[in-house]
Amino acid sequence: AIGTGTLLSLSEQNLVDCVDTCEGCNGGLMDAAYDYVIEKQNGQFNTEASYWYIGIDETCMFDKYEKAGSISGYYNVAASSEDDLAAKVEQYGPAAVAIDASAVG
């Protein structure tokens, strides 16, 4: 979105169905999803419009001809460090954030 001015909605279902090191609809780690996309999908994602979310685990239907956006690498941020997050965003751009809610009770 920063480079083109267009915000794309990427397919969650693509990750649910295709990333075999995660647990489908039961979740998984961003690192595993990024690694899979980089290694198995040549860094490419499908759009939400071309691979819509259905909320159940299905067979991987990634279509390399419906690609939108790509990833070539990623950086981790030190846990609970707003300063490290700010520095990484300043240096590399947008960030994805995960929150561990398993201890909430």
Image: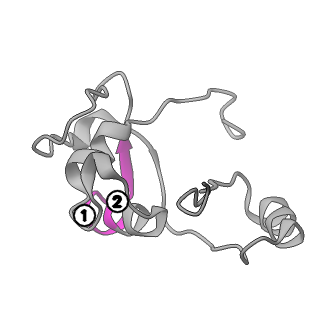
Q: Which residues are magenta?
A: 36-45
Here the colouring is: one colour
What is the quadrant of residue 55 in the picture?
top left
Q: Please tell me whether residue 10 belongs to the stretch shown in magenta.
A: no
Q: Which mark is residue 40?
A: 1
* Residue 50 location (% of width, % of height): 29, 25
Say which quadrant the N terminus sits in: top right
What is the quadrant of residue 98 in the picture?
bottom right
Say which quadrant the C terminus sits in: bottom right
Residue 44 falls left or right of residue 103? left
Amino acid under disc 1: Lys
Label 2 neighbourhood size at 10 Å, few (<14), some (14-19), many (20+)? Answer: many
Residue occupying image coordinates x 53% and y 30%: 8
> Which residue position holds label 2?
37
| Residue sticking out furthest to the right | 83
Q: Are marks 2 and 1 in contact (CB under 8 Å)?
A: yes
Residue occupying image coordinates x 21% and y 63%: 20
Q: Is residue 37 above or below residue 56?
A: below
What is the quadrant of residue 89 in the picture?
bottom right
